[in-house]
Amino acid sequence: MKSARLTTHGILFGIGMTYVALLILLPLAVLTIRTAQLAPADVWKILTTSDTLAAFKVSFGQAFLASVFNTATGIPVAFVLARYRFPGRKFLELWIDLPFALPTAVAGIAICGLYSQSGWLGSWLEPLGIKVAYTTKGIFVALVFVGLPFVIRTVQPIVENLDIAEEEAAACLGASRFYTFRRVIFPALTPAIVTGFSMAFARGLGEYGSVIFIAGNIPGESEILPLRIVHALESYDYATATILATSMMIISFVILVAINLLQKKHALKH
Amino acid sequence: MNSPTEEPTWLRRALIAFAFIHVALMIILPFASVIAQACSDGIATFTRTFGSRDTIHAIKLTLLIALIAVPLNTLVGIAIAWGFTHVKIPGKRTLLALLDLPFSISPVVVGFLFILLLGKHGLFGGWLEARGIKVIFAFPGLLIATLFVTMPYIAKELIPLMDGRGREEEEAARLLGAGWWRIFWKITFPEIKWGLLYGIILCTARSMGEFGAVAVVSGNIRGRTNTLPLHVEALFQDGDLPAASAAASVLAILGIVSLVARTITDIKAKAKN
């Protein structure tokens, strides 16, 4: 009996793991081998070409700015959703997850249409001299859209679970509401805020579909890292594509490990 | 008078107003604008877009990929989640982290990985070519890239639900002589069904909406290897914004449907607990 049970479990698990290994580990192994085969001097040369450096700068810069924006706006929204009851709350809850559910190509075309010269917002902004479509500002707007739910969704459950007694104690001791927020609530939210920020940042670095519609995609100017890989592939420059893919893998791996460590540390504290 | 743990009324109102304006400006407005673009020339845009052979082919291709990828990933997802929560093996945490990889790698890198593996100059490229099997720039490549990016959804949903729940019931059923299938069907399945449904919805939405990974392996041959999201871009590149928006609005509605379905499964799952 027992051995029969173990076999069923074992076979199921084995099938699942083989599938994961073939689908995920095998491609990763090939990328590692291909990277190792490149000469270090070539790697350096490719990484320091002006277009590649510019792509790094655009991707990191805009992903960072968009995540900062989403963090600053996400904290009050998460607080509102967690603490306040008002008509239309469910409506807000539903729409906030839209960036997760909407295919990136749809997001791209939607944002591009909105900020183009004849679009609802573009026709307003362009006379003021603010050009969003086909500039780095377009990348920022697209990354704000795709990264918007992360901070809200990581912070909101933490606010919901906060112990109100701590805030009452602070109030009893004469703390103002603002002081309580700064010294009691905010510190408790910090790990969730950093996690949400990191997730949005990682997503922003890798994002492709929504950005390419609006970015203009000019090498050295508004070309993001993933697009640089696509352009390299189109010109059969596999060495550049390999190095950039490996760099992006390493970056996302580091962010993933950082998030995991942060959550572990936070879990230990409670 | 406000209680000391509440913000003043004016601040509450301001914060709520901010949340509404933020969501309206950043999320609802782009969504509404794509629908408005699609409808700008009335029904004519839709008949023109969806009457074209390339669009019809793109829709069929997208549905076919989802029809294969979703059931396959559902079965494997259940197997992984079951194994993960029932088999004692070392290194489970690493394994769980591995499941996160498809979410954290750039879709473009995913596509490139499969070019390295299965493309003309890839590891298995020569072997496949000798047998006349075309994977990259063909249907199998699109399918494999989609399988990769949608792999974790179901397992990730199920693992927390299967972990440590209903274990006593399972044990009792086993002692009473129930087989594996019966235990799964009668005890585990009722526990996980809403989570499973939610995972399937997410998996379906992503498989139909994936762009970057399939863009790299597709080669963008119209009427051949363009899925619906890729077809949206092709129409956009033609400068035909209304047609691109019309094609996109179908995907947009798919997104909304998955959101609503998600909300419903959430409510059902909460009602159960």
Image (cartoon, rainbow, N blue to C red):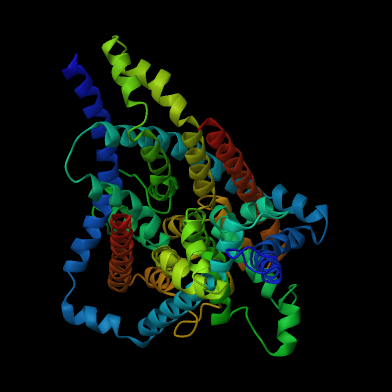
Answer with left or right where residue B48 lies relative to residue A73: right
In this rendering, does residue A211 appear at all? Answer: no
- A1 versus B143 height, above or below: above
Residue sitting at 71 percent across and 78 percent down? A122
Q: Residue furthest bottom?
A: A129
Residue at the image point whose x is 71% and y is 71% from the top: B10
**How far across and how far down the image is residue B135, in percent?**
37, 48
Instruction: Decide which of A104, A243 is in the foreground and name it.
Output: A104
Q: Quadrant of the N terminus of chain B?
A: bottom right
Q: Position of residue A31 (x, y in %)?
A: 25, 61
On screen, residue A35 above or below A15: below
Q: Quadrant of residue A131?
A: bottom right
Q: Is residue B83 visible to us here? A: yes
Instruction: Estimate the x, y position of residue A136 in percent, counting from the top left.
Output: 54, 81
Identity of the residue furthest to the right in this view: B42
Residue closer to the observer: A200 or A246 = A200
Q: Quadrant of residue A38?
A: bottom left
Q: Does residue A28 appear left or right of residue A98 in this picture?
A: left
Front-lying residue, B184 or B37:
B184
Q: Residue placed farthest to the front in the image?
A: A173
Nearer to me, A87 or A48: A87
